[in-house]
Image (cartoon, helix red, strand yellow):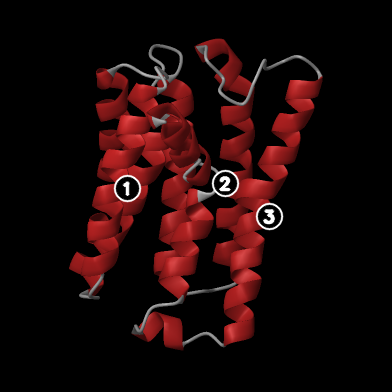
Amino acid sequence: MEEKFAKGISVVFHPLIIPTYVYLLMLNQESFYAYLLPAKAKWLIIGLVFITTFLLPLLLNLLLLNRGIIKSFMMETKEERLFPLLITSIFFYLCAYFIHSFQLPNLFYLFSLGATLVAIFVLLINFWIKISIHMAAIGGALGTFLGLSYKWEVNFIMIILAIILLTGLVGFSRIKLSAHKQFEIYSGFLLGFGLMFGLYLAI
């Protein structure tokens, strides 16, 4: 039962879908920057993020799976993760480029830029250790909303508390599935959280 729950958490909060969740939350809050955009524009942005950071990388990963370059979506070895991480980094940057070109409030571009940097750092660190991508993603989400709360003084307390709870669930799930060691879990979280929180504080 616990293993099924862990698998469900790992799928629902897969790293590729986290950017879409973050944009959904950012664009549907009662805050000054959300009011700047009409509803149609918000859904167009969310659709763009979903396509560039989830759908297209997923389709290319399916191609890698079909060609035998990766054995499964679990990507159990560091070697299997290289091409998917490279693909993810490229599409995350493409998303950041589009967001920047739309001249949206800077906080959206900062998130997409930060997500790209997290993906690149995970790719580089992967040559040494199998750092947790799930934890880097959820840590990045937490760092984003804490950074926004501090820098822009927007009340995200309920979202922050929910992400803290999810962080524990995702970490438990990855350990339960024997996907990572504890060091890989903690280092993934610290990378995502530290980079995103630091980026919002610095700029």
Residue 39 pos. (x, y %): 58, 85
Q: Single out the residue that lies furthest toward the front.
A: 1
Q: Is residue 48 left or right of residue 77?
A: right
Q: Secondary structure beneath disc 3?
A: helix
Check disc 2 and report the residue beneath it. 92
Please rate how many residues cluster around mark 1, counting C-alpha atoms within 10 Å: few if below 14, some from 14 to 19, many from 20. Answer: some
- N-term-proximal mark, 2 vs 1: 2
> 17 or 32, which lies in front?
17
Numbered circle sitting on residue 51: 3
Tell me the amino acid under the disc marked 1: Leu
Label 2 to label 1: alpha-carbon separation: 23 Å
Horizontal side of residue 190 vs 57, given as left or right: left
**Nearer to us in this view, 87 or 8:** 8
**What kind of residue is marked 2?**
Phe
Which of the labelled discs sits on residue 166, or is there none? 1
Q: Are marks 2 and 3 in contact (CB under 8 Å)?
A: no
Task: Estimate how packed mark 2 is, as few (under 14), some (14 to 19) or many (20 or more) residues with alpha carbons within 10 Å.
Answer: many
